[in-house]
Amino acid sequence: MKHTQLYIGGQWRDASDGGTFEVLNPADEQVLATVASGTVEDAKAALEAADGAFAEWRARTPRDRAEILRKAFELFTANLDEFAKLITLENGKASADAMAEAKYSAEFFRWYAEEAVRAEGQIGMAPASGARIVVHHKPAGIAVLVTPWNFPAAMGTRKIAPALAAGCPVVIKPASETPLTMLALMPILEEAGVPPGVVNVLPSRSSGAVVGAMLEDMRVRVVSFTGSTEVGRKLLHAAADNVIKPAMELGGNAPFIVFEDADLDAAADGLMLAKMRNIGEACTAANRIYVHEKVEEAFVSKYTDRMAALKMGNGLDDGIDVGPLVNAETRDKVAHFVDDAVAKGAKVRLGGQRPNVKGFFYPPTVLTAVPDDAECLKDEIFGPVAAIQTFNDEAEIIRRSNDTIYGLVAYLYTGDLKRGLRVSEALEFGMVGLNRGLVSDPAAPFGGVKQSGLGREGGKEGMLEFMEAQYISTNW
Ligand code: NAP
């Protein structure tokens, strides 16, 4: 499955200047592949290919597009093991996490195969004139998709599937840490019947220049980005000139609240998912853990037992739960967050020491009594570190949870559903896990408020991001 060239107009090709970059295996720091690094010229060629494919693709019937997406789901599903292995090789996550991602990724093709035939409109009557108001949805145009390294497959399929369902061609720029999985998807889309030029993949080490050049082209009508808030802000600025429709899935700083009436075993299991799925390298990862002071010791002890049972090692090996982080920078940042918190008074219940081994490993770590000024409470930790604080009042914990520039997801555990719904509503987050440690679902609108983003992926909403409503005023 190892493709290393650019994929433009249904053809594999080298970069126009012959440039390449290396992809490392985070488990042993060895070079896994040398990949073509797309240039601005290649980006223009990809847009030409997408433009050339647009008229025919949008003219296909919704059923036709749906059948192709369904076939893509079936082919992806038949290749889950290969995808999971590739994800582990380039990202580092353990096999079970990689398999969960592969399955989740395939589901976007199934869901949007089902949604492609449901682009609904409406007919109404203008209140004053009696004219008819006819509203329908049209494909927006070429979409530029930019994805991060933490879910090399899912962040791509979550955008490609709805764009294709809507009738849009795409150019996707995967993260330079993990371009192989997206490239490996292309033969599957080809076999499923996606015509040349409808999906183009442009790995590039010059991401700013390449994406910037595409956003200067009037034919691009959507930019769908998943990544850091910092880069998202830049893309919003760049999109403003041509007034390109943005869909932004940005950073998070999720609170995880355990009330005194919660089922503590369920909460500890939920936190294992919310913190340790993907080794904590998830925008949805629980970042600030707030436990009611009455249950602190009982909860921390249950949770620490679970964390201590995890086995760290090469993600491909049997029985491994925690693989390496994606690169040295991410590992060093995690180590810095722990050192900073401990220097300011946090207590280490588990882990906290960077191992002296090859590979970008950091062990599962539990910190308690984390002081308010610890950096890890303000920034995304993006690693296997649980930073725990206590609280004793519902209003206070709502205020503290909302005290962030981010608003992606919040989690809370309580035995009182009335309280659960009341607090959920008061939390300024796009998604809430109420007695659940996992919210991601292809059938649900995933996305954040505040500086966590604009727009939604998944659900009905995900396809509308790639469509424009058109209103026709008429009489009959
Ligand atoms: P990142 O640095 O923002 O990079 C994301 C993508 O943007 C990569 O493909 C990157 O390319 C590209 N990029 C970087 N600079 C660019 C520029 N100036 N112009 C255009 N593209 C540019 O994020 P990351 O470190 O890969 O991913 C981690 C972040 O993603 C976290 O903040 C996480 O919360 C967020 N995330 C959010 C969601 C969500 O749904 N809300 C989901 C997953 C991750 P290169 O790789 O070549 O630099």
Image (cartoon, rainbow, N blue to C red):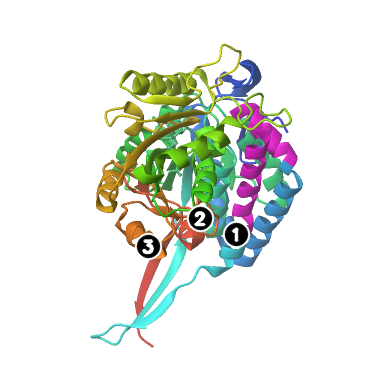
Residue holding disc 1: 111
Q: Earlier in the sequence, mark 1 or mark 3?
A: 1
Looking at the image, residue 91 sits to the left or right of residue 216; the answer is right
Q: Residues in magenta?
A: 81-110
Looking at the image, residue 284 sits to the left or right of residue 318; the answer is left
Which x, y percent locates residue 218?
Answer: 38, 45
Tell me, yes or no, whether the highlighted magenta stretch contains residue 323: no
Residue 458 - label: 2
Judge whether 352 appears above or below 185 on screen.
above
Give the CA separation, mark 1 to mark 2. Answer: 8 Å
Q: Residue furthest left?
A: 128
Judge whether 399 appears above or below 177 on screen.
below
Q: Do callouts 1 and 3 mark residues in contact (Cβ within 8 Å)?
A: no
Please name the residue shown 50% across and 34% down the image: 280
> Looking at the image, which is closer to me, 475 or 300?
300
Give the CA separation, mark 1 to mark 3. Answer: 28 Å
Q: Do callouts 1 and 2 mark residues in contact (Cβ within 8 Å)?
A: yes
Mark in front: 1 vs 3: 3
Ligand 1 shows up in which quadrant of the image? top left
SS label for mark 1: helix
> Picture quarter containing residue 34?
top right
Residue holding disc 3: 421
Q: Earlier in the sequence, mark 1 or mark 2?
A: 1
Judge whether 282 appears above or below 322 on screen.
below
